[in-house]
Image (tube, helix red, strand yellow):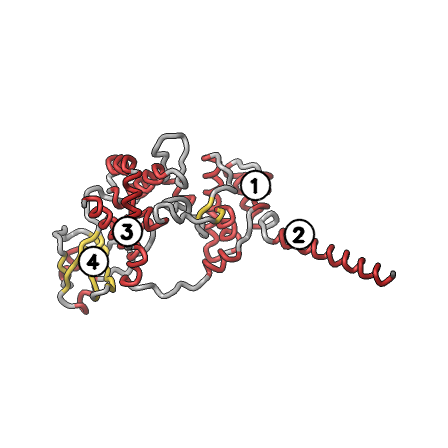
């Protein structure tokens, strides 16, 4: 009898300890008591008039996601050469789905092109590269992603902390539940994968229904992408890139840009043996780059519209993938 009672007491004690541990673990897994969250709540109250208690309740439900920290902390793999990067995005399936998306949203795309001057194929290509036309917008709660990165990822905490603020403002302005919106593990949202700051600055209610929905409303997504580009220097009717022939690779390499900003002019490139395949103003500032393609190195000159695409994603190969997909979509539409 005493043995049974002893075992029961031990079981109860063990169960009690387990419940306490589980509660403690749950507390540690959210941001209810996190000091950085408390500071942010105070700032949102002082700067934007948010009531503190609902924010505390929100952060009590925001979950710390270790896999997000693992993913963003993982050392970047060696950058793929263009010959390996290109096939990821330039596929017949992505072209076919793009043509289907274009057909379904033709009116919105035509109006965006007329109002903003951004070609329909560029808008479709962006949405195709980003989310395969809405097929993969990310299933992570934005509040979890941004809270995890704002409070537990010091290397980029200032950026994600600001994005978290922008997100709280966004959800208040759009009158949506901050626990309801989903996106990528870094907090990018909807068909065009806008970060909250970009949403607030560039997303538009393109169908004039009183709200901006880039998650489920392709019309708003189309208008928002077009607005983003025109705000980042897109020049209607102008080229994106021009292929160049070179005389001497060693000399030509001296003209390669060390970043994405257009700093060297066409005349300087010509002196280094670059010959654009299309006429260009000699004084035009450009971005000069080389791609390791299937048939060997290719040399390209990126113009203002190329730079605008890199403002969406700071990568030469990303911009080239968007450009080539757009070219294929445009050609397929004309067949």
Residue underneath mark 4: 300
Name which of mark 4 and mark 1 comes first in the sequence.
1
Horizontally, is 331 left or right of 69 in the view? left
Does the CB distance between marks 4 and 1 fall below 8 Å?
A: no
Badge 2 element: helix
Badge 4 element: strand
Q: CA distance from mark 3 to mark 1?
A: 39 Å
Residue at (53% x, 54% y) in the render = 65
Residue underneath mark 2: 23
How far across and how far down the image is residue 11, in percent?
A: 76, 58
Name which of mark 1 and mark 2 comes first in the sequence.
2
Name which of mark 2 and mark 4 comes first in the sequence.
2
In the rendered image, which quarter is residue 40 located in?
Answer: top right
Residue at (41% x, 41% y) in the render = 215
Can residue 257 be seen? Answer: yes
Name which of mark 2 and mark 3 comes first in the sequence.
2
Dot 1: few (<14), some (14–19), or many (≥20) neighbours within 10 Å? many
Quadrant in the picture for the C terminus:
top left
Residue 179 higher or lower than 14, as above or below: above
Q: CA distance from mark 1 to mark 2?
A: 21 Å
How far across and how far down the image is residue 50, in percent?
A: 54, 37
The disc at residue 55 is: 1
Dot 4: few (<14), some (14–19), or many (≥20) neighbours within 10 Å? many
The disc at residue 322 is: 3
Dot 3: few (<14), some (14–19), or many (≥20) neighbours within 10 Å? many
Q: CA distance from mark 3 to mark 4?
A: 15 Å
How far across and how far down the image is residue 182, in percent?
A: 46, 45
In the foreground, 126 or 281: 126
């Amino acid at each position: 009898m005493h043995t049974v009672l002893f075992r029961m007491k031990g079981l109860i004690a063990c169960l009690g300890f387990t419940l306490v541990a589980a509660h403690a673990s749950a507390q540690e897994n959210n941001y209810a008591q996190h000091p950085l969250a408390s500071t942010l709540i105070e700032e949102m109250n002082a700067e934007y008039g948010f009531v503190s208690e609902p924010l505390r309740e929100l952060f009590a439900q925001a979950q710390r996601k270790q896999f997000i920290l693992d993913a963003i902390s993982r050392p970047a793999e060696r950058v793929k050469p263009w010959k390996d990067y290109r096939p990821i995005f330039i596929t017949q399936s992505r072209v076919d789905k793009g043509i289907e998306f274009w057909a379904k949203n033709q009116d919105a795309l035509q109006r965006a092109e007329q109002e903003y001057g951004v070609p329909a194929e560029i808008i479709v290509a962006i949405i195709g590269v980003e989310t395969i036309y809405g097929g993969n917008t990310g299933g992570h709660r934005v509040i979890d992603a941004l809270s995890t990165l704002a409070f537990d990822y010091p290397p980029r905490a200032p950026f994600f902390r600001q994005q978290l603020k922008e997100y709280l403002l966004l959800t208040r302005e759009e009158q949506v539940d901050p626990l309801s919106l989903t996106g990528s593990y870094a907090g990018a949202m909807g068909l065009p994968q806008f970060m909250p700051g970009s949403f607030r600055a560039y997303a538009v209610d393109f169908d004039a229904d009183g709200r901006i929905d880039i998650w489920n409303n392709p019309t708003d997504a189309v208008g928002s992408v077009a607005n983003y580009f025109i705000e980042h220097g897109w020049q209607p009717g102008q080229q994106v890139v021009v292929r160049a022939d070179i005389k001497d690779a060693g000399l030509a390499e001296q003209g390669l840009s060390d970043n994405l900003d257009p700093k060297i002019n066409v005349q300087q490139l010509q002196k280094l043996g670059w010959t654009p395949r299309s006429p260009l103003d000699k004084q035009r500032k450009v971005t000069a780059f080389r791609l390791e393609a299937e048939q060997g190195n290719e040399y390209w000159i990126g113009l203002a519209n190329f730079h605008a695409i890199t403002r969406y994603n700071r990568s030469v190969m990303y911009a080239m993938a968007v450009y080539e997909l757009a070219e294929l979509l445009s050609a397929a539409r004309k067949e």
